[in-house]
Image: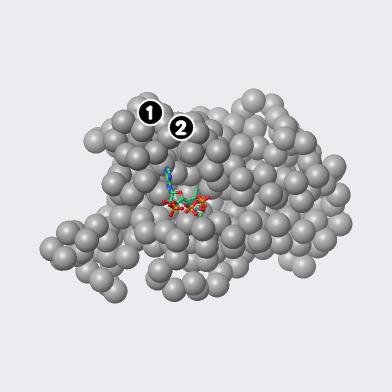
Amino acid sequence: MPKPLGLKILGTGHYVPERVLNNQYFIDRLDTTDEWIRERTGILERRIAAPHESSATMATAAARAALADAGLTPHDIDLIIVATITPECYFPSTACFVQESLGMRPTPSFDLLAACSGFIYALVTAAHMLQSGVYRRILVIGAETMTRITDYEDRATCILFGDGAAAVVLEKCDDPNGPSLLYHQICAEGSGPTVLTVPAGGARLPASLMTVNERLHYIKMAGREVYKVAVKRNIELVDETLRATGIRPEDLAIVIPHQSNLRIIESARERLGLPQERFFTNIQKYGNTSAASIPLGLDECLKTGRVGRGDLVMLIAFGAGYTWASALLRI
Ligand code: COA
């Protein structure tokens, strides 16, 4: 079992675009119904970025909010990690755009790609880097403009995704009884290119007239297959995290799962036997925002007082790759 890593959340913040896409938007354009979307996914609405917005602009806004919450300025940050699957461009990294927009002195900045598990991967990476003593404060951001890679002609995927960003400012904590990353698990198992991917635009299948005509720059997903694996992995993550730490479900203040589908979340909640109020959901209003979904949840739980100092919070995520991850935080 990994040893606890002293880790304090100094501040959190988020940004979501103003424009809301409700289910009616899809009903007006596709062969679908409000009942189908609600019952199969739990989603009522999601946010969509304005033309002038992108992953870096939203990440920057979320970072500013987190820094203000922490009472810090960009100059207090030693390193930036942006978890995203919708970067500004091939290169440079979205983190470099954020670093520049925040007006920071030269600061190590990089992106991390682990799809919907990206935020937990980035949190764990940051926690280990803080332990080295080289970095004092790290800004970890999950930022996605999913609607730019969503095919609005594919009714099975376009209803699922939304845009947003959220950020946390982290510092090492030396008090063994203080805030801590008590347990973490990150893992991946390659599933090949067919299950959940954006097939074109990379080195494997560069952009061409054919890839554009065949809509290969959009998300392709074998939904039913992903669903089954997601349910199985989420339950395993919960079981393993509890077993490894000896924590009982009733000791948890809240579980913040990646918001992929309300039914996937419910299966993990039932496994824990926790009441709905101790299992965070915001998929109803944001849809699946990939790497942004867990920090959006964390920020909301901290700001609304659902979580406070000393509380135990479990984060779980599953995503394309496949990747999966869990973290147990003492706030
Ligand atoms: N409205 C109405 N019908 C729809 C629809 C929509 N928006 N989208 C798909 N359908 C239809 C399908 O065409 C299919 O019709 P058929 O039986 O005539 O072939 C039927 O509904 C069932 O499709 P299926 O894909 O089996 O539905 P499902 O119950 O698995 O739900 C998802 C689809 C996408 C909601 C579900 O599979 C899912 O959530 N998968 C995981 C998604 C996910 O978490 N992805 C990210 C990983 S982090």
- In front of the other: 293 or 217: 217
Image disc number at residue 24: 1
Seen from the viewer's position, the closer of residues 141 and 36 is 36
**Height in image: 26 above or below 210?**
above
The image's colouring method is one colour
Q: Which residue is mark 2?
A: 34
Counting other residues with Cα less than 10 Å from the Cα at mark 2, is it few (<14), some (14-19), or many (20 or more)?
some
Across and down, in percent, residue 257 comes to: 63, 46
Question: In the image, what residue type sits under mark 2?
Answer: Asp
Which residue is found at the position 25% from the left and 35% from the top?
A: 52
Residues at badges 1 and 2 in contact (C-beta under 8 Å)? yes
Residue 48, percent across and down?
Answer: 35, 35
Residue at horizontal 59 percent and vertical 60 percent from the top: 228
Q: Look at the image and tell me whether residue 182 can be seen.
A: yes
- Gap between marks 1 and 2 measured at Cα: 7 Å
Asked which secondary structure carries label 2, the reply is: helix
User: Residue 44, which numbered label?
Assistant: none
255 vs 110, left or right, is right
| Residue drawn at the location 44% of the way across and 44% of the way down | 160
Between residues 194 and 206, which one lies in front from this camera angle? 194
Q: Position of residue 191 (x, y in %)?
A: 49, 72
